[in-house]
Amino acid sequence: MLKPRMWPNRSKSTSPDALLPDTDGRLPERAQKPFDCTPVGILLTVKFTKLSTSQTPGKASNGEVGKALRGKAKQLYATDDPEVLWVEYKNSATAGDGEKKEDFAGKGRLNNLITTLIFDLLKKRGIDSHLVARVGETSQLVKKVTMFPLEIVLRNTAAGHFCSRLGVEEGIELKEPVLEYFLKNDDLHDPFVNDDDLVALGVCTREDLAEIAPLARRINEALIEIFAKIGIKLVDFKIEMGRTPDGTLLLADEITPDSCRLWDQRDGSGKVEHLDKDLFRRDLGDIIPAYEEVESRLAELAKSEGIEVAE
Ligand code: ADP
Ligand code: UDP
């Protein structure tokens, strides 16, 4: 009997202690919830030195993923390599702290493709991520990291909460990129925090922040350039980071239209055409054609840069 382990999405605890990243490089025991399932017999030919053994995902015997598991956009499973996790991208979209929820056929596949393309394009620009490989329509293998419980937001153009909080009109170009941190805590609705809050609570050290902030800004610069090349304005986005057992800071989680605001610039009219989850958040239209458009433009760019692209 295979007993994969599941990592939940967010800490449900409001205790600052519960937010402390583990220092030994392992995911916290408190987050491990074993459940029973039988092996699915999927054996992957592994091309990576670290992955000398076959990887088996934590899938239920009936092939379903996530049925009995929590997780909003994706779910993570242990593999037989302790340094590697299996990620399943799901079709569900949530907004407003999970109050609004809907499934969109094909979204998991598209987000898996998009995040893989973006991580590959970033790698070409010298920025590493947790991605090991895309291994299926909706699945990836990633390096397991100890996550900082942070949503790291970069803004280039005013939108969303930045506007409501500061009384600014959406679409105003910011004089310089804004870096914001939100503590990942559902009970507290992911509160806005500053460097002092994070250091005082022990969520990160000054040294961590001195690494996280410049990496986040480099990622922003690279993404602005990538999206500009495919006629898309990068308004803002959220990323997450963690440390590998050897202490390396890595971009983790995902970069998809779920986690970015992407405005189409191709028709040149100046009218805002959303290619992101605001279509769902604001009931503006179907997200799937927009996500397909982002995927096909990124794939075209990746091919032009000699990156191997899934057909
Ligand atoms: P959320 O609701 O927090 O957006 P998701 O449904 O996207 O969560 O689930 C992904 C979870 O996995 C997040 O909590 C994220 O911090 C975590 N995660 C992402 N990449 C890694 C990684 N490489 N190692 C460990 N945890 C990760
Ligand atoms: N974002 C995200 N996950 C969240 C909250 C925000 O990926 O839980 C992204 C969002 O898609 C946008 C950026 O972070 O690209 C900034 O979002 P904002 O703070 O404006 O919040 P929102 O208005 O999206 O709730």
Image: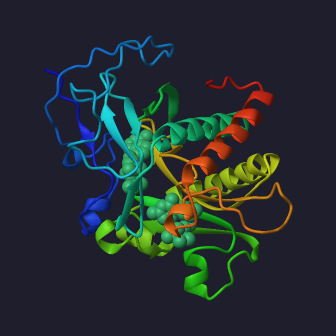
The residue at 22%/19% (across/down) is: 39
Quadrant position of residue 168: bottom right
The residue at 38%/31% (across/down) is: 86
Residue at far bottom of view: 167
Is 247 left, or right, of 289 in this rendering? left
Is 185 left, or right, of 228 in this rendering? left
- Give the percent coordinates (x, y) of residue 216: 62, 55
The residue at 26%/63% (across/down) is: 17
- Give the percent coordinates (x, y) of residue 35: 15, 36
- Give the percent coordinates (x, y) of residue 219: 66, 50
Is 253 left, or right, of 6 in this rendering? right
Number of numbered discs present?
0
The residue at 69%/83% (across/down) is: 169
* 194 over 26 or under it: above or below: below
Quadrant position of residue 14: bottom left
Quadrant position of residue 165: bottom right
Q: Do we see residue 152 in this rendering?
A: no
* 300 over 281 or under it: above or below: above
Task: Choose between 86 and 270: the one closer to the eye.
Answer: 270
- Give the percent coordinates (x, y) of residue 173: 77, 73
Task: Choose between 76 and 148: the one closer to the eye.
Answer: 76
Which quadrant of the figure contains the N terminus?
top left
Which quadrant of the figure contains the C terminus?
top right
Task: Choose between 295 and 33: the one closer to the eye.
Answer: 295
Residue at far right of view: 268
The way the protein has been coloured in the rendering is rainbow
Q: Do we see residue 6 in this rendering?
A: yes
